[in-house]
Image: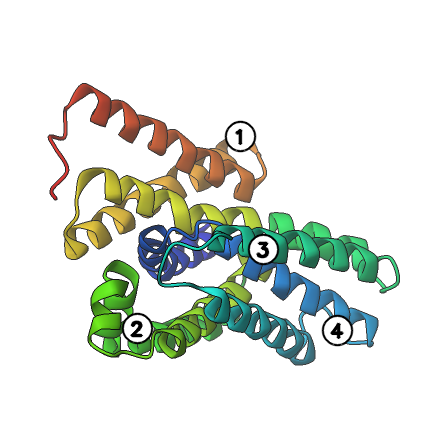
Amino acid sequence: MAAPFVACMILVAIHSYLGLHIIARGVIFVDLSLAQMAALGGVVALLYGAAPDSREAFIFSLAFTCLGAAVFALTRTRTKSRVPHEAIIGIVFVTASAAAILVADRAPRGAEAIHDVLEGAIIWITWPTIVTKGIAYSSLGLLHFLLRRRFLRISFDPEGAERDGWRIRWWDFLFYVSFGLAVTLSVPVAGVLLVFTMLVVPAVIAFLFSSDIRSMVIISWGVGMVASLLGLWLSYAGNFPTGPLIVCMYALLLLLAGALRWLGVAGERAT
């Protein structure tokens, strides 16, 4: 179980941080939408004869993900709109899901590809895959570190960024492309359900207990580490499916965090 554990820690490191941006922006289901766009691209690649784990399939997935990123960047409004941004995200998700089912009906191994996208196969990850994806995630992490002031400002204070004359949509597009690349890399390994959980649940718990960015990052990483460790151990001990069990462990920690907040054990969240 060493390789799956290391893979989980790498995924936690990048996704729990990106999740803070997603919660701050209020676009909770953007991960599901981009993941589904990536899945659609992968199924389209199968239709044209590409192997499921080939470079061609990855390029197709990334291209469809970038298309989704462009849609989300262009449709984001800086003031309250008659059509919420979350509605656009939901429409993209259901449209991509329906299109993926239609294409899968005509593509070889289409049905199996859809199943793999949902559940993932993190238990079968190999060390060469970990090294390759680790390098890619490190590059994404470096990008976000170098541009952290820009990305954090447009996520947590978009009104202030607009007053300062920032090109919000350009920075939005760059953020969503980097976010979509992380999702495209992660979904074949962990599946849509686990990737979504790693993004959202640690960030939600962090927002419950702090408003300081550094503290929120530490809380998110800690939650992800504990949930992944518990899920992997119970999966090994009880012979349960690994990905779904880790998702349930995240949900259990969220319930525990909610109970602690309700009991006032952790004190009031900073403002």
Q: Which kind of residue does numbered mark 3 sit on?
A: Trp
Q: How is the image coloured?
A: rainbow
**Counting residues from the N terminus, which is met first, the one under dot 1 or under dot 4?**
4
Residue lying at 66% horizontally and 62% vertically, measured from the top left: 39
Q: Which kind of residue does numbered mark 1 sit on?
A: Gly
Q: Quadrant of the C terminus?
A: top left
Tag 2 secondary structure? helix
Asked whether, in this view, residue 158 is left or right of residue 9, the answer is left
- Relative to 145, say whether 79 is above or below: above
Asked whether, in this view, residue 103 is left or right of residue 160, the answer is right
Residue marked by disc 4: 45
Residue marked by disc 1: 238
**Counting residues from the N terminus, which is met first, the one under dot 3 or under dot 4?**
4
Asked whether, in this view, residue 233 is left or right of residue 91, the answer is left
Q: Which kind of residue does numbered mark 2 sit on?
A: His
**Counting residues from the N terminus, which is met first, the one under dot 4 or under dot 2?**
4
- Measure the C-alpha gap from mark 1 to mark 4: 37 Å
Q: How many marks?
A: 4
Mark 4 and mark 3 in contact (Cβ < 8 Å)? Answer: no
Provide residue 83's location: percent of width, then percent of height: 51, 53
Residue marked by disc 2: 144
Q: Residues within 10 Å of mark 3 (few under 14, many from 20)?
A: few
Residue lying at 60% horizontally and 53% vertically, measured from the top left: 121
Q: Residues within 10 Å of mark 2 (few under 14, many from 20)?
A: many
